Image (spheres, rainbow, N blue to C red):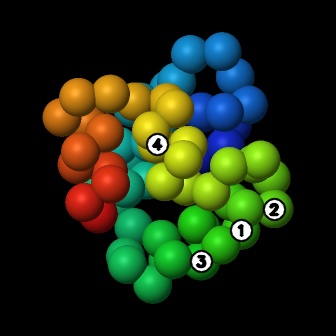
């Protein structure tokens, strides 16, 4: 869902990203980020930097 809502499309569906980052446990997010590498040419940190800016970027990178 992160890939589909970000790198795969033009424009980022930030609502989906916020939902995933805020509703999933840390162990689940770790698995999501590992799997994300299979679909995206970028790791999750690179994707965050490319897809969002400002406070949202800082928040996602902190998580």
Disc 1, SS: helix
Compute the Cα span from label 2 to label 4. 16 Å
Find the residue positioned furthest to the bottom: 27
Foreground label between 3 and 2: 2
Mark 1 and 2 residues: CB-CB less than 8 Å, in contact? yes
Q: Residue at x 65, y 72 (%)?
A: 34
Q: Which residue is mark 1?
A: 35
Disc 2, SS: helix
Q: Earlier in the sequence, mark 4 or mark 3?
A: 3
Q: Which residue is mark 2?
A: 38
Q: Nearer the viewer, residue 24 or 38?
A: 38
Q: Position of residue 6 (x, y in %)?
A: 59, 33
Q: How packed is label 1: few (under 14 Cα within 10 Å), some, or many (20 or more)?
A: few
Quadrant of the rendered image containing residue 11: top right
Q: How packed is label 4: few (under 14 Cα within 10 Å), some, or many (20 or more)?
A: many
Q: Which residue is mark 4?
A: 48
Q: Position of residue 43 (x, y in %)?
A: 62, 57
Compute the Cα span from label 1 to label 4. 15 Å
Q: Which residue is mark 3?
A: 31
Taking 44 as reference, is 29 above or below it? below
């Amino acid at each position: 869902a992160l890939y589909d809502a970000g790198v795969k499309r033009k424009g980022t569906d930030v609502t989906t990203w916020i939902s995933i980052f805020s509703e999933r446990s840390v162990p689940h997010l770790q698995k999501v980020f590992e799997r994300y590498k299979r679909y995206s040419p970028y790791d999750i940190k690179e994707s965050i930097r490319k897809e969002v800016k400002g406070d949202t970027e800082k928040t996602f990178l902190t998580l």
